[in-house]
Each structure stands twice: as structure tokens, then as C-alpha cells.
Amino acid sequence: MLDALPLSRKQLRSVVQASARINLWHGAVRSGKTIASLLAWLLAVAEAPPSGLILVVGRSLQTIERNVFEPLADPALFGPVAAQVRHTRGATTATVLGRTGHLIGAADARAEGRLRGLTASLAYVDEATLLPEGFWVQLLARLSVPGARLLATTNMPPRHPFTDRPRPVRHHRNGALISTLIGGRGPMRKAIDRASGNGRKSSIPAGPVESAPWSALSGEAEYRAALAEAFAGVELGEYDRRIIEWVAGWDSPTVATLASLVIRARKAGGAL
């Protein structure tokens, strides 16, 4: 039965194995990783939780359209399912199997602002190693719905994005490979650690902040706790609370620095 499908056994195996929170297809150009990952993503969309946004991320809207939605809309690749994928060129949303997908271009670090305040249940990332590390931090933090998953592809760069080790000589020409268990200390692994809080102690900077304190806080629970500490004992109105809740939806450097400024200002004024 597997041999009757227009996918290699390795591609099909990668789809079946893509059940982790973070799933990465990697390999040489034309190794089949994109088609396998898109099939896995269609299955994930069909099973996605009703709450939380579905995101499609790439270097730009143009690359997302070319690498994701053009293949998805091709009946030769996806048969009748292709008719269930609707996207207007230049639009920032698409309809996939009746669900709305939000397209986000991430050309530089400023793109992480597009993620602030949202909650996501599923993300597909095209060419993962081209995304800024700060964007990865924010994206992983926003995948906060129980059971949230991320599927991503990359043409493997000279060094593995998770382990930071040299790429193996074998280029996996026989089909897509998938990494679902992530280890190592590469830049993308560091982004995961920053978003999940692995490997470091959370703390509000006690003195002047000279560089973005990415490792200070992890997740909105810690963001809220830091802001609660900063404004402890301050009489708050309803709008004050709304603003604090809004700030808690920003990133670690912003919240940690603001909390630090408020605490240091209160200490300087003798309030603490």
C-alpha cells in the first residue's frame, strides 16, 4: 500500500513520525522534505485545536506563496485536497480545510512584533534557519495552546541549526529526514531554551540593562509575576491593570527591562 502512494517510504515515515511539539524536516535541495512536511501539516490542520491561531511563517509573503501555497494548491501533488486550499496572492490569510491560516513574513528581528499578543495552536515554518533567533523565541512562546505543534523545513546549512555541529557528509538524497527530538546548543536550540526556560534561572535585572535580557524571564506566567513584583503595593485602576496585562504579552527583554526600571525607580525614590 505504501508503494502505491506518490511519496517515498522515507517521506511517509517522516509524516507518521511528526508527532512531537517541534518537527523539523531537513535535507538537500529536492530531497522531498517540503511535500512531506506539507502533507503532515494538512493532517495537523485537520486535527488542530479549535482555539488558537494557525500560522504560516517564512522569509516573506512571496516565499510563503511560492514554497507553501503553490504546492498545496496543485492537484497533481495533493489531489482533491488542493481544492480545499484557498489563498489570494498578496493576502495575509488563507483558508486551509476550512480553517484560517495567518501568513507572517519574518525577514528581520522586527518581525517578532507581529506575534505579540496572539495565541497559536499550530505553525508551519518555511526555511527555518532563515528566521531571526528573536522571532523564534516569540513564536515558540506563542504556541501556548495545549497540544500546540510546530512543523518546519530547512535546507541544512553548513552547521546544524540545533546542535551547531558540522553537517554530516551524507546529504540524504533518498528523501526527507525529520528531527523530532531536539538536542544540542545551536542557535535554534538556544531559541527554544529562551522560550521554554531551559537551562537558566529567571530573574529581573537588578541594575542598568546594557543588552536585551532574553534569558531573564520565560513565558507569560513569569512576565506577569515580574510585573506584579514591580507594581506591588501600588494602587491600580481598571485601565492600569489592562495596560499591565497588555505589557505581559510582549517579549522577555521588554517585560524584564520595564519591571527592572520600575523597581529601580521605586528604590531610588525610597518606595521600596
Image (cartoon, rainbow, N blue to C red):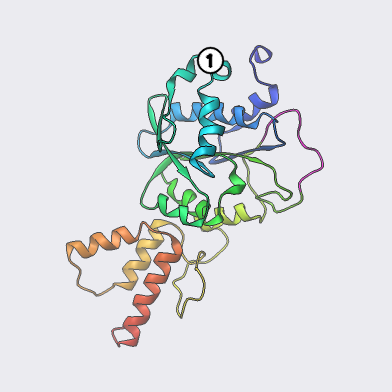
- Quadrant of res 243: bottom left
- Mark 1 neighbour density, 10 Å: few (under 14) some (14–19) many (20 or more): few
| Residue 234 placement (x, y as % from top left) | 23, 74
Residue located 70% across and 54% down the image: 164
Which quadrant does the C terminus fall into? bottom left
* The magenta segment: 167-177
62 shown above or below 74: below
Amino acid type of the residue that numbered disc 1 sits on in the rendered structure: Gly
Q: Secondary structure at mark 1?
A: helix
Quadrant for residue 172, please give it. top right
Q: Residue at x 76, y 46 (%)?
A: 167
Q: Position of residue 146 (x, y in %)?
A: 42, 41
Instruction: Please report the residue visible at 45 percent of the width from the left and 29 percent of the height from the top.
Output: 45
Relative to residue 33, is residue 55 drawn left or right?
A: left
Q: Would you say residue 174 sits in the magenta stretch?
A: yes
Q: Quadrant of residue 3?
A: top right
Q: Which residue is mark 1?
A: 79
Residue at the limit of the structure toward the left, as seen here? 237
In the rendered image, residue 112, in percent from the top left (x then y), is placed at 46, 53
192 shown above or below 224: above
